[in-house]
Amino acid sequence: MTLVEDTIPVSELGTPALAAENIVKRFDGVHALEGARFSVQPGEIHALLGENGAGKSTLIKILTGVHHPDSGTITRNGEKVEFANVRVANAAGVVALYQELSIIPSISVAENILLGEQTPSRGGFVQWGALKKRAKEQLESINQRKIPVNALAGDLSPVQQTMVAFARALATDAKVLILDEPTASLTDTEIIELFAVLRSLRDRGVAIVYVSHRLEEVFELCDRLTIMRNGTTIITKDVADSHIDEVISTMVGRNANELFPERGTATDEVAMEVLHLNGRRVKDVSLEVRKGEVLGIGGLAGSGRSELLRILAGAQKHVDGEIIVGGTKLPHSPGVGRALDAGVALVPEERRSQGVILDASIQDNIAVANIPTVSTAGIVSGAKISTITQRGLADLKIKARGPKQHVGELSGGNQQKVVLAKMLARKPKVLLMDEPTRGIDVGTKAEIYRLIRQLAAEGTAIIAISSELPELIGMSDRIIILHEGEVSGEVAADVADEELLLSYCYGKSQS
């Protein structure tokens, strides 16, 4: 695809707060960035978009001193700079806040905001009064007066922890904020609150780089967008001059309407039946899913969606009810092991904390979930581990240097693929997927949708949760909506629309 030039000449925008030109970076001989360029203006919210593996993370790390470019230039307020490390970048006013916030939960809000060199002290002793006063001032500067500076940071809500991270960045006089998926763990109400703070920072002249896979947010919040693909900058333009379908097609090289494969693989054979299931939140839920069918589960946060999948996977006990797999009733609260042996596997929502071991290799992650497959008489076979790992890498198109690369070094989408690979190696009859595309780019989403359809075509029954109604409609054969733990509606996906599903989400039952 021919590269599209910037639609707005840099000369018309003034001097950028931060800019990168012709950045090249290789890892083990492989190009991660090849002539990438990016700039953000003071008082601008600029979206940086692209698939996982497009080069966004590498570019951010170069802009913040984590990595050093092989060639190319970085300028800060028009002057060439070389950030030797993160500390140097921070001193220049460039701060990155990542999806996994570096908040220390066991110390107070005030201490988190004024860590390290920002801590007021005299003669080696912390001046606690001054520390709390300055922390309050930083919170007030972003309209967060209600956050108590004496509270433990670990006791705060996710959005409050994000605000504390902002306050800490501003305490270092940050003029360029780089935000990586800042809304990933926030509710809709919390996102509104976050956006208000970001707009106030923009009004104060802070330059904000906004990395997100939620394109609706980009079009609501951002001024300009830059799209990367395969380590190269493809286009930079005003958000007002673009639209979501154009962004998707530019990111992935194909039209947005090609994301979801065709349906039609469901059979008449029931793979799992659930009868009158009750849990902490789940109330009298009955459902069935057939071989080759994708059953979508929707509902608002707190509706019982995730609890339902945890119960079905044996990861959470239930009060009463029956779970029948392939005609065989499972014992009450069977536990994960018994559920796996029965052919029920769960891909959890929180992949980093529940789905993978970040500091272990890809092959170790896959092997640990498949000990019976890779061992004989208690002796683990390296050849068998290699076989199932290579199959997973190939079948799921996992982008990695090799099977021994640590999972924590992979992009979010490829981490999700590792979770899938280790579960699929067990050849489950019923695959449970909780937010299977959360936090991954649109291109990888399309790959996940394709994989879901492929598994269904091979006879696997799939139950998948999604908070995104278009995704729920596009990937499912049939949809069930939960409201306050109960089934409030059921509809065939090919006749569903967002308005109907939303009414079910808010408790309007079928007539």
Image: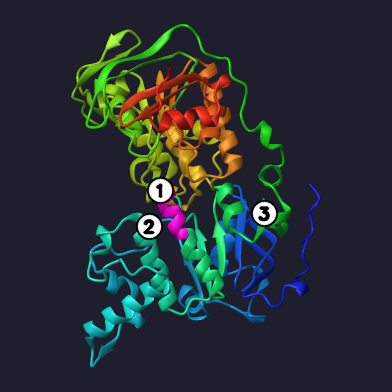
Q: Position of residue 377 (x, y in %)?
A: 27, 24
- Left or right: residue 351 compared with residue 262: left
- The image's mark for residue 187 is 1
User: Of label 1 and label 3, which has the lower sequence position?
Assistant: 1
Q: Which residues are magenta?
A: 185-194
Does the segment drawn in magenta span residue 347? no
Between 188 and 272, the one nearer to me in the picture: 188
Q: Which residue is mark 2?
A: 159
- Left or right: residue 133 compared with residue 66: left
Q: Which residue is mark 3?
A: 227
Q: Main secondary structure of the magenta part?
A: helix
Between 451 and 222, the one nearer to me in the picture: 222
Between 358 and 354, the one nearer to me in the picture: 354
The way the protein has been coloured in the rendering is rainbow
Which type of secondary structure does the marked residue at label 1 adopt? loop
Q: Position of residue 427 (x, y in %)?
A: 42, 22
